[in-house]
Amino acid sequence: MIRWRNLDDPYSDRLASVRTRAPHDILGVPVDCTKAQARRAYLALVKTYHPDHADPFMAAYNQEMLKLVNQAYAYVSKRAV
């Protein structure tokens, strides 16, 4: 599969590598994590990538990362112990 990158977006390569990772890897928690561990990791990442707290020059990247973090948390929290 060929992934075309957007030459106007300098962060497209970085996002492509993150999109292929497992949800547990995105959050940085083990597969057998508890709901509390997943929530703690989720909140830390939301603080990092939230538009109100992040660098305005990386707004597009932060917006995509926030979507990925939300999707990963939704998946992990359903399957957490």
Image: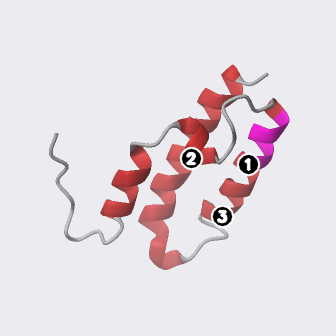
| Residue named by callout 2 | 26
Q: Give the percent coordinates (x, y) of residue 34.
A: 81, 31
Residue that label 1 marks: 41
The amino acid type found where label 3 is placed reads: Thr
Disc 3 packing (10 Å; few <14; some 14–19; many ≥20) = some
**Relative image position of residue 17 (x, y in whole percent):** 38, 53
Which residues, given as a range, are shown in magenta?
A: 36-41
Q: Quadrant of residue 46?
A: bottom right
Secondary structure found at label 2: helix
Q: Quadrant of the C terminus?
A: top right
The numbered disc on residue 48 is 3
Tell me, what colour scheme is on the image? secondary structure
Of 33 and 12, nearer the camera is 33
Q: Nearer the viewer, mark 2 or mark 3?
A: 2
Mark 3 or 1: in front is: 1
Residue 43: image location, x then y, percent:
75, 51
Magenta residue check for 68: no
- Position of the N terminus, as image quadrant, is top left
* Main secondary structure found in the magenta portion: helix
Q: Residue at x 41, y 45 (%)?
A: 19
Residue occupying the point 80% across, 31% down: 35
Disc 2 residue crowd, few under 14, some 14–19, many 20+, Cα 10 Å: many
